[in-house]
């Protein structure tokens, strides 16, 4: 899976009161996604994050917009891939628009200096990933450096409205718009982020969004020891069945996804059903239900590619697979009578042989490459010892059907 994440944590602001642990929160999420969730690429921005390719990663507005554009315009991800966007810092509601405040954001001019959450969502959607997670610990008390505070609602409502416009976008907020998001000195983290990683990790083992939602609702107020109600936007309900941590998914989690897939197929939402079955397969690559369903849906969705003349099975119209002629002489053909009027044309495949395994010169190159990649020589040699040396394999003659078996013939 090509999972990617953009993680931002800002303690120090040019025009806003500093925060204590936003930077540590983003670092905490980064370490978890890389080590425990196996994310392939993570962009990390904080007050002192290191340069990448000679470019600063300070969380200023231009840098954050640049990485969002880079994700949006880069190689498209697949529908089973996941993208996380995590932001720990100040947020501001201005003229009905939710903004995330970069380190150089001016609360008196957010439209020109801050980043609308709608812009973030738009760029995340354009990357092609089927699963988009927007986690915002940005509902904090707004206090300027000059001591002036802000009253009224914080961000959240408009962001949720935008997130719900597109399927498979999950918006997780640290608290309700009229609440504060608390930082905890004893944990040196925000209550929300600490509970988030705890829930996704070994303590909570929350494989799905639905389970994570339940965990956060109880755990965050307990940690904060105050009124802080995290919100997970799940609309429609099936969004809650999205598997965030495949390593903790069980048979019940997969069964729910399968039921959603069957329901989508019955409603003739074939693309949605295909995506759900692919998510099952992404968790368990050997699931026979998913493999069979994907094959069947492929035939229904792309009949011109897979099939020719239609046939009927149990009242449903299926189609016969496309003939794939083999370059064989007619003298190699045999006809096999299967009974019930079904005959198969079989092609005689002659006996032959081929070389299997890795040549000695390639084994030496592999060993040298492994050592250069800091793999212990003993481990590399052990792997080579267990790998298959090149050897010749003989294959006896056999018969193969000239055409793929149709549903009618199978029945």
Image (cartoon, rainbow, N blue to C red):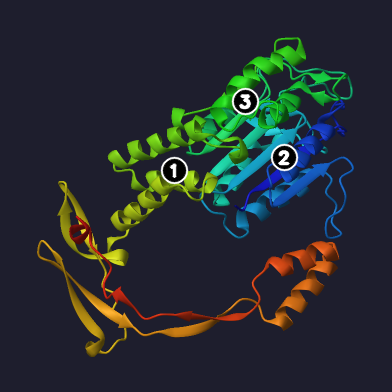
Q: Is residue 135 above or below residue 145?
A: below
Which residue has dot 1 on it? Answer: 276
**Cα–Cα span, label 2 and label 1:** 40 Å
Q: Nearer the viewer, residue 365 or 227?
A: 365
Query: Is 345 on the left or on the right of 226, as rendered?
Result: left
Residue at the spot 57% in from the left edge and 54% down from the top edge: 77
Q: Secondary structure at mark 3?
A: loop
Give the number of the mark in front: 3 or 2.
Answer: 3
Query: Is 374 on the left or on the right of 81, as rendered?
Result: right
Query: Which residue in the rendered view is the most extreme toward the left?
Result: 341
**Cα–Cα span, label 3 and label 2:** 20 Å
Q: Quadrant of residue 377?
A: bottom right
Which residue has dot 3 on it? Answer: 156
Q: Position of residue 202 (x, y in %)?
A: 70, 31
Looking at the image, is mark 2 or mark 1 earlier in the sequence? 2
Residue at the spot 28% in from the left edge and 39% down from the top edge: 266
Q: Secondary structure at mark 2?
A: helix
Answer few, some or many: residues within 10 Å of disc 2's Cα (few below 14, many 20 plus, some between 14 and 19): few
> Residue 389, which numbered label?
none
Residue at the spot 83% in from the left edge and 56% down from the top edge: 52
Q: Nearer the viewer, residue 20 or 303?
A: 303
Looking at the image, is mark 3 or mark 2 earlier in the sequence? 2
Q: Nearer the viewer, residue 147 or 239?
A: 239
Q: Is residue 115 above or below residue 38?
A: above
Which residue has dot 2 on it? Answer: 112
Q: Position of residue 65 (x, y in %)?
A: 71, 48
Query: Is 317 on the left or on the right of 134, as rendered?
Result: left
Q: Quadrant of residue 201?
A: top right
Contact between labelled residues 2 and 3, with CB atoms less than 8 Å apart: no
């Amino acid at each position: 899976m090509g999972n990617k994440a953009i993680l931002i944590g800002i303690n120090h602001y040019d025009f806003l009161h500093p925060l204590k642990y936003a930077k540590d929160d983003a670092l905490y999420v980064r370490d978890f996604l890389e080590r425990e969730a196996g994310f392939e690429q993570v962009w990390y921005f904080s007050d002192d994050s290191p340069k990448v390719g000679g470019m600063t990663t300070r969380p200023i507005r231009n840098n954050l917009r640049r990485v969002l554009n880079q994700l949006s315009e880069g190689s498209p991800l697949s529908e089973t891939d996941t993208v996380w966007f995590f932001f720990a810092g100040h947020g501001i509601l201005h003229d009905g628009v939710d903004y995330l405040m970069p380190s150089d954001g001016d609360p008196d001019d957010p439209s020109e200096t801050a980043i609308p959450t709608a812009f973030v969502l738009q760029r995340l959607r354009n990357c092609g990933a089927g699963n988009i997670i927007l986690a915002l610990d940005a509902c904090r008390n707004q206090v300027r450096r000059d001591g002036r505070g802000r009253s009224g609602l914080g961000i959240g409502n408009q962001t949720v409205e935008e997130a719900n416009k597109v399927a498979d976008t999950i918006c997780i907020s640290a608290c309700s718009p009229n609440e504060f998001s608390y930082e905890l000195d004893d944990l040196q983290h925000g209550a929300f982020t600490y509970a988030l990683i705890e829930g996704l990790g070994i303590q909570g083992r929350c494989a799905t969004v639905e389970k994570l939602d339940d965990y956060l609702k109880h755990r965050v107020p307990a940690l904060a020891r105050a009124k802080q109600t995290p919100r997970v936007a799940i609309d429609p309900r099936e969004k809650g069945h999205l598997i965030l941590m495949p390593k903790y998914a069980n048979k019940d989690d997969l069964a729910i996804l399968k039921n959603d897939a069957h329901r989508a197929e019955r409603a003739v939402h074939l693309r949605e059903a295909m995506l759900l079955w692919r998510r099952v397969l992404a968790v368990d690559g050997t699931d026979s239900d998913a493999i069979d369903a994907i094959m069947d849906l492929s035939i229904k969705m792309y009949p011109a590619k897979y099939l020719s003349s239609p046939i009927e099975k149990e009242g449903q119209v299926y189609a016969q697979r496309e003939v794939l002629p083999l370059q064989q002489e007619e003298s190699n053909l045999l006809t096999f009578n299967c009974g019930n009027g079904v005959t198969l044309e079989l092609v005689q495949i002659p006996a032959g042989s081929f070389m299997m395994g890795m040549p000695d010169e390639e084994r030496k190159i592999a060993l040298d490459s492994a050592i250069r990649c800091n793999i212990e020589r003993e481990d590399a040699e052990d792997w080579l010892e267990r790998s298959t040396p090149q050897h010749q394999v003989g294959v006896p003659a056999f018969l193969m059907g000239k055409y793929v078996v149709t549903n009618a013939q199978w029945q």
